Image (cartoon, coloured by chain):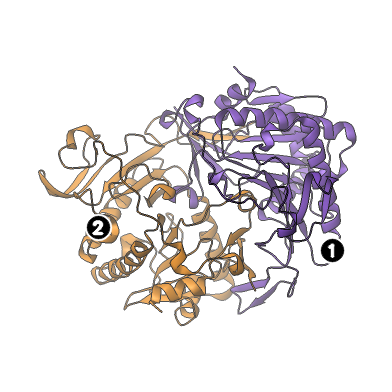
Chain colours: A orange, B purple
Amino acid sequence: MGELRKDYFLDRWVIIASERGKRPHEFVQEQVKQKAGKCYFCPGSEDETPPEIFRIGAKNRWKMRVFPNKFAAVRQEGQASIKTDNIFYTFSANYGMHEVIVETNDHKKQLWDLAPKDIVDLISLYSMRIKELGKMNGIKYVQVFKNSGKEGGTSILHSHSQVIAYNKVPELVEQEAKAIKEFKEKMNICPYCCIINSEKDSFRRCFENRNFVAFAPYASRFPFEIWVLAKQHVKSITDLDNGQVKDLAEVMNSILKKLKKLNAPYNFMLHNSPAGEDFHFHIEILPRLATWAGFEFNGTIINTLPPEEAAKFYRGE
Amino acid sequence: MGELRKDYFLDRWVIIASERGKRPHEFVQEQVKQKAGKCYFCPGSEDETPPEIFRIGAKNRWKMRVFPNKFAAVRQEGQASIKTDNIFYTFSANYGMHEVIVETNDHKKQLWDLAPKDIVDLISLYSMRIKELGKMNGIKYVQVFKNSGKEGGTSILHSHSQVIAYNKVPELVEQEAKAIKEFKEKMNICPYCCIINSEKDSFRRCFENRNFVAFAPYASRFPFEIWVLAKQHVKSITDLDNGQVKDLAEVMNSILKKLKKLNAPYNFMLHNSPAGEDFHFHIEILPRLATWAGFEFNGTIINTLPPEEAAKFYRGE
């Protein structure tokens, strides 16, 4: 038996069709052999990336590096303001800043090989870029995300995150902010605060420490999808105190170690508050072990692994 | 220079970042070698599929076959009615029927190798299944779609389409129906009728005959995305007359031949009217030559090929 399920408060529907599915261990991916060739994210190629914006560590023994993306999706050119021609044609320049954060100097290490203290450093870079880029003219949102593995949409295997600051709030973040507002007006509480309370003791619970909780969401879009939420109602990763950052790094490390066991390609996206909105900071991690096809692109998503099974895998049961 | 663009009337945004992109011929995919092994969609294996629902041609010399999907995402079991527990948990059974339409008895042919008259036959099967399944208890929508190629989400290479009839209108179709309603209330005309008029003479025009038009949509989500629309305001593929069916088959054939040149994996989905709604029938074809990643899953989509370039490719310029 499967189920049709709706997201907690978005109009997003998923068919959980476990009878089509595989057991968790059957999702394990083969190791991809890296192509030989020069890596521009490696030490020694610093002069061949666009000029460095920030670095952790000494110039010749750096640990992490931030620089503009050479193949930027958005640029600081043209008009950031959005216009409409003849009703149907709404547009602006692809305005903004697109940066890369190289997470380690070691080509052979992935984020799941790094220690929690390294993830603390990475979080500090995320916060720094969000604060700095968020202040720039015309920027409405700073989106931090990571693509890992070929099916995760990356062509460069050297472990890195990306930052796109642009003239729009991402549609999903906007929908979430709207849903929070409507829910709070009715119930006088943030829906995510309620969901955390409900999920942290459910069959979908995965990890928990003093400040953070992680669970497989009720209407998971992907096998092994997992969300990490601050227990306190915090608007953005930039508002976390040191203890919270440490706890976030610890939970992220626990999740990534599990994804390493599957050798899973994945994406994750920070969900921070847009300026002036109330929001509940969280990170959504989407392993990419299934391909969306024709049915999914019209809306409803088929997921062959129930989140309750994914949670057992994360809990080590 | 690129652009941020919004869909004609949905809240769907795309960054057209052509400077990152490739020329059309650089998108050509390598031929995938088929794995050896038995194909259950081939002649001779008829007894090993679930019982046949319909067939074009003689039992031993059939041309097309319809049967239930052995690995169905939805089933005729449990409750089709949707319920909500504790505010956040909305669900039903994964209720419905999931069918396969094998499009040819020839394992080596793909839909793009078939003639327009074969596509006329396929359209007649689509219409028949939509009418029949749409009458069944608890069914709100009959979704017809095709997945082609590995990146298109299919594991079975023998050319086939799929039909999922279930207890929900797909979110995208629902959003479109809502937008049509709102637009018509304001402007007293269907927005798609306006868009056709505007696009069929634009730089995004691709194909046109007496009854159908095809163009690359203004905010294309994928390189080479193309939509096929009935020129007349027709609600569903089931309402087309013989002349319209012939013209639709001709345009689909022209598009598929172009996709064959790229050896492109692709999906297409029929957009028919939900019961009781007004709607403008169309087909959306999504070549899968790019991978959505972290940024896309938060909403805004990056597309590296402007639809104006895709249209040139379709027009043979």
Quadrant of the rendered image containing residue B171 = bottom right
**On screen, B104 above or below A115?**
above
Mark 1 burial class by Cα count in 10 Å: few <14, some 14-19, many 20+:
few
**Residue A50 location, quadrant:** top left
Would you say B170 lies left or right of B212 here? left
| Residue B235 visible in the displayed image | no
Residue B207 place in picture, x, y as percent: 71, 25
Residue B136: numbered disc: 1
Circle number at residue A124: 2
Q: Residues within 10 Å of mark 2 (few under 14, many from 20)?
A: some
Residue B244 visible to the viewer: yes
A304 relative to A74, above or below: below
| In the depicted structure, whether residue B44 falls above or below residue A232 | above
Image coordinates of residue B209 in percent, x first then y, are 78, 24
Residue A43 lies left or right of residue A183; in this view the side is left
Camera-nearest residue between A252 and A308: A308
